[in-house]
Amino acid sequence: MVVAESVQQHIKVSISHGGCRAFVALDGPIDDTSISDEDIIHLLQSKGVVIGVKKELLSALKNNSHFNEPMLVAEGIEPVAGKDGWVEYLVNTKLTEPMEEKGGLVDLHNLHRIHNVQKGQKLALIHLPQPGTAGMSVSGTPIPLKPGKKGVVFLGSYTALDPQDPNTIVATEDGNFVAMPDGKVEVQPVLTIRGDVDFSTGDIDFIGSVVITGDIKSDFSVKVKKKLEVHGNVEDANVQAGGDVIVKQGFFGRGKGMITSGGSVKVAHILNQSIICEKDITVEREAVCATLKAGGKVASSRAKFVGCTIEGGNEVEVLNLGNGEQTQAKVYVGQRAQLVENYKSIEKELEQLEKQLAEVRNGVYKLVRIQLDGNISDEQKQLLATLKQMQNDLPHTITILQKKKTDANVAIHTTSAARIIVRGTVFVNVLLEINGVRKLVQSGLKEVMFVENNGKIEELSAPSS
């Protein structure tokens, strides 16, 4: 390829870093009018520029009066970098500022510091990197693409990839979702509050179990689906747990506090407050002016009870009841009277349904006879359809009630074993009720067990522990 000497003398060719652009510059005016566009193209080709030449700019180049200024004359194909992968969190983990209420007050109870997730819930989506496209230099050399990087994510405790979608992260347990700065995600089935539940934490509402190393302060609430353990005290607070509650110190205040549990409750001592649970209550040292209601036992053989109202399923066991002064205790165990009433109510309802079923069957029989005779009206047809539906439904309802009647009968005989055991002393003026039968203690007694027998409360020696 022969390039005109004047072209070589006056036109300088440069290629950008990366090779995607070619530039030419004049170092002075071109006097040789015989220079053609082809001459310039040949010059570019001699310099390796063979792709993307902008022929429409070549003529303008010869008339360019801006000397030594590069002019773009060829463009290759720029590579398109791949898009980096990223992780999209499906749980909002951003901390929110406390809400301002009417009157300028700030709600410091609802701080939204806990991110509840359920087992199987989707936590995050992993978006794959995009590959991008390769380029081509003006010399025809391929320019490799730059692929996107993978999104940074590490599976922590109680997280996994969804078997149906390997780009989705799911929770393998109920708990608190946490996204770490280093890309690690995890679910915490047990939430540990290091310190007190107060204005620094706000109220707690958690799907798993909670351990509180400090106290639960007055006017705050703690709700947990599973177990709650408090290493300090509980003040005038509202506590609700689906599982057991353990308070290693005291539960005290002005009577505004309440612990409600779907399991058992254990406290060291209690003053003025209330506990309701489905299973057992254990007080380790003393209870004063408290209200305790256990679906199971009140098992507190080493604790003293003064001025309390105690209700146990079938057994209450304490060290002392009362103190011989004005503030005494009331103890209720067993529910036979209530169970008997419930049994009678079920029995009466069962009799009514069986009578109704007999009447329905008789009505169906009469209407079918009319239908066979061909004299049935539209209104009678509608009534027949209704009665037939009742004839199908009533036996199922009766079967359910029969089972309830059997269960109620078993409960009556089970609750007959209700008892109150006092390992130390029961003082005067303590009110006892067993299976609906009441007794007011007239004189102090030691190591005694109270049971109900044929409508009377008997005093027996306390069984060995």
Image (tube, grey):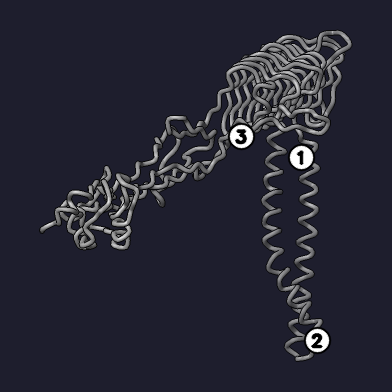
Expressed as whole percent of the image width and height from the top left, the position of residue 411 reads 69, 39
User: What secondary structure is marked by label 3?
Assistant: loop
- Residue found at the very far bottom of the displayed protein: 374
Given the image, on which type of amino acid does mark 3 rest?
Lys
**Which mark is drawn over residue 36?**
none
Callout 1 amino acid: Leu
Q: Which residue is mark 2?
A: 377
Q: Residues within 10 Å of mark 2 (few under 14, many from 20)?
A: few
Q: Looking at the image, do the residues carrying marks 3 and 1 touch, with CB atoms under 8 Å apart?
A: no
Q: Does 356 sit left or right of 82 as displayed? A: right
Q: Position of residue 243 (x, y in %)?
A: 61, 31
Q: Earlier in the sequence, mark 2 or mark 1?
A: 1
Q: Residue 164 versus residue 38: which sits nearer the camera?
A: 38
For marks 3 and 2, the one nearer the N-term is: 3
The answer to whether residue 125 is left or right of residue 295 is left
Indicate the amino acid at tag 2: Ser
Compared to residue 465, the image places residue 37 above or below, namely below
**Image quadrant of residue 416?**
top right
Is 71 or 245 nearer to us in this picture? 71
Percent from the top left, x then y, of residue 57? Answer: 32, 59
Residue in the picture at 64% in, 18% down: 196
Q: Is residue 451 above or below residue 349?
A: above
Place of residue 22 in the rendered image (x, y in percent of width and height, measured from the top left): 27, 50
Q: Is residue 232 visible?
A: yes
SS label for mark 1: helix
Q: What residue did someone put label 1 on? A: 339
Q: Nearer the viewer, residue 274 or 382?
A: 274
Location of mark 3 (residue): 225
